[in-house]
């Protein structure tokens, strides 16, 4: 039986807007295809896991306070996560998790939370707490091999700069910065995005992209995922697209 191994980090702290639902979607879509999905969790202070033994490491979003709470612990995990990433483990990161993989996140009061520096971007929140990027968002992506309009919900003060390879192009909403053209960060084995939702519930192609990567990363012959009935998900997404994109 094929299987994938997931490490869900800080599920008890970084779980804005039901971000943990993303991992439920991954395991549901694996189960429907007879793929075994082992999902472990890691919380601050737990024994250091063998990060490289996982196919996928997932971190959700959180408010500034939660980010501060876990930041020392996350730094403690830096070498393990970095090595895993370099060995091909997929990183899926939402909002607060996205910010903390860059150089730093500076909040509205000027407090700086050191990031892992795995990627070159950095994030700064404006000093006015009222200036947040909040609302529905549509991002056009092309990396799955076709054009997909990904829908989600964003709520962040942080403005992320110096992103060389974004997740996609903003069609509606803000993205990395207020009214910016680009959203998130993308690489061979990383998707980092401001989209909550939980975003995978609304965007099955992105779930399958991640599952397919995980299942094939150590395979010489590509295993194709069987098709699932995504009519409901696609209809729901179409409602949002019709409402937001004229
Ligand atoms: N605290 C961060 C910000 O406001 C991240 C928020 C989030 O994860 N939604 O930018």
Image: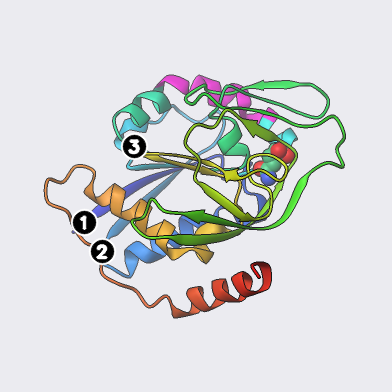
Tell me the residue that label 1 is attached to.
2
Q: From this viewpoint, is residue 179 visible?
A: yes
Tell me the residue that label 3 is attached to.
89
Q: Which numbered disc, 1 or 3, marks the residue closer to the eye?
A: 3
Q: Do the residues under discs 2 and 1 have CB atoms within 8 angstroms?
A: no
Q: Position of residue 86 (x, y in %)?
A: 33, 27
Query: In the image, 237: left or right of 173?
Result: left
Q: Do the residues under discs 1 and 3 have CB atoms within 8 angstroms?
A: no
101, above or below 237, in the image: above
121, above or below 28, in the image: above
User: What is the magenta segment's predominant secondary structure?
Assistant: helix
The span from disc 2 to disc 3 (Cα, nearest Å) is: 19 Å
Mark 2 near ligand 1 (CB under 8 Å)? no
- The secondary structure type at the circle numbered 1 is loop
Mark 3 packing: few (<14 Cα in 10 Å), some, or many (20+)?
A: many
- The secondary structure type at the circle numbered 2 is loop
Q: Which mark is residue 225?
A: 2
The span from disc 1 to disc 3 (Cα, nearest Å) is: 17 Å
**Which residue occupies the foreground of this view, 136 or 198?**
136
Q: Residue at x 85, y 38 (%)?
A: 129
Q: Residue at x 55, y 71 (%)?
A: 237
Q: From this viewpoint, is residue 63 visible?
A: no
Mark 1 packing: few (<14 Cα in 10 Å), some, or many (20+)?
A: few
Residue range (magenta): 68-79
Mark 1 near ligand 1 (CB under 8 Å)? no
């Amino acid at each position: 039986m094929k299987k994938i191994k997931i490490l869900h980090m800080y599920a008890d702290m970084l779980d804005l807007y039901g971000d943990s639902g993303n991992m439920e979607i991954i395991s549901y879509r694996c189960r429907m295809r007879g793929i075994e999905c082992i999902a472990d969790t890691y919380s601050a202070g737990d024994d250091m896991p063998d990060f490289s033994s996982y196919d996928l490491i997932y971190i959700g979003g959180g408010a500034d306070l939660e980010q501060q709470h876990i930041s020392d612990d996350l730094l403690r995990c830096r070498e393990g996560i970095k090595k895993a990433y370099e060995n091909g483990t997929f990183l899926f990161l939402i909002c607060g998790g996205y910010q903390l993989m860059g150089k730093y996140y500076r909040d509205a009061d000027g407090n700086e939370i050191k990031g892992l520096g795995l990627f070159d971007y950095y994030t700064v929140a404006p000093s006015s707490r009222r200036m947040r990027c909040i609302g529905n968002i549509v991002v056009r992506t092309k990396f799955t091999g076709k054009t997909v309009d990904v829908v989600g919900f964003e709520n962040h003060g942080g403005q992320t700069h110096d992103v060389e390879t974004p997740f996609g192009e903003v069609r509606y909403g803000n993205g990395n910065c207020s009214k910016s053209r680009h959203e998130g960060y993308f690489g061979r084995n990383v998707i980092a995005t401001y989209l909550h939702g939980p975003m995978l519930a609304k965007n099955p192609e992105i779930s399958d992209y991640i599952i397919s990567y995980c299942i094939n990363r150590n395979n010489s012959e590509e295993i194709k995922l069987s098709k699932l009935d995504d009519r409901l998900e696609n209809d729901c997404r179409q409602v949002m697209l019709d409402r937001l994109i004229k």
